Image: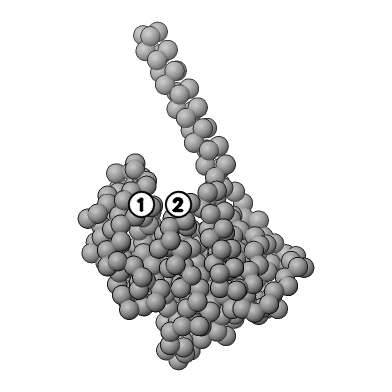
Amino acid sequence: MKMIRRLSLILLLFVICLGAFVYFFLRSQGMFREPEYDQDRPTDVKVKMPAVLVFDKTNGFIHKDAIPAANEMLSQLAKKNGWSLYHTDNAAVHNPDDLSKFQTVIWNNVSGDVLTEPQRQALKTYLSNGGGFVALHASGGDPKYAWDWYVKDLIKAQFKGHPLFPQKQSGTLVVDSPDDPIVAHLPSRWVMDDEWYSFDTSPRPRVEVLLSIDETSYSPKMAGTDISMGIDHPMIWKHCLGNGRAFYSALGHYAETYRDVNYSRLVEQAIIWASGKSGAPCKASVAN
């Protein structure tokens, strides 16, 4: 009996220690934090057209490797294309005056609730008036959102999970729109390693899908739970929003994704499209 009690106590202590370890590890990655909102707008927003805003605030999970890798890729693309790039994690940059200085707003792995109500309205107005929006990976990867418009109208799909054990897997991406400049450089089937997001439903009826993933090429299970979407599993898409343009890529959990020349070119063409420099113009009367 004493041996059983001793083993039970050891097991209990192990579970407590394991739980504490998991909690503090996840907290170090940005989880379990109260949102922090920015009220004071930056004072150094001085750019020349064409200009892009790169925003990477995190009130949720922090992609500690992906965010700097994406910023480096975006900096290189800006130099190549002659874009004036302004980078900040200050959400108060989302105000009418500052947003008007940019052709495209890029959210780099933004997580958690980050904007106040006036800042939300400023972004909505910016897009309806013809601004461009590019969202990368975690910017559409929160399990729930406090801002319904963002997930329903801007991203167009609710994230529901990604594979675990293993998390990083090789997968085969399928080009849906081979004539679109954003993906025209890719092979019809593109194999790469990443963390593959699943969504509650396919956004295909509401967007133009550019890349899907073949679920037979990887295991869509999250710790044993089936998170498959079936034969229609979009990963990258675009759509019009009022007179504005919105692009989302679910790729990019790992730093090496942003160092891949094919992916860098894809994001480059997405920014060009979002800025209104390619493709047919968006019209408010036919916006999704």
Q: Nearer the viewer, residue 74 or 204?
A: 74
Picture coordinates of residue 179, whole percent (x, y): 32, 79
Residue 149 falls left or right of residue 48 = left
State the SS at label 2. helix
In the rendered image, which quarter is residue 46 located in?
bottom right
Residue 223 falls left or right of residue 103 = left
Q: Nearer the viewer, residue 25 or 80?
A: 80
Q: Residue at x 45, y 52 (%)?
A: 256
- Mark toward the start of the polypeptide (2 vs 1): 1
Q: Nearer the viewer, residue 223 or 246?
A: 246
Indicate whether 282 appears above or below 74.
Answer: below
Q: Are marks 2 and 1 in contact (CB under 8 Å)?
A: yes
Whole-angstrom CA distance, mark 2 to mark 1, is 9 Å
Q: How is the image coloured?
A: one colour
Picture coordinates of residue 273, whole percent (x, y): 47, 78
Q: Check disc 2 and report the residue beneath it.
A: 256
Indicate whether 7 appears above or below 103.
Answer: above
Q: Residue at x 49, y 28 (%)?
A: 16
Residue type, numbered disc 2: Glu
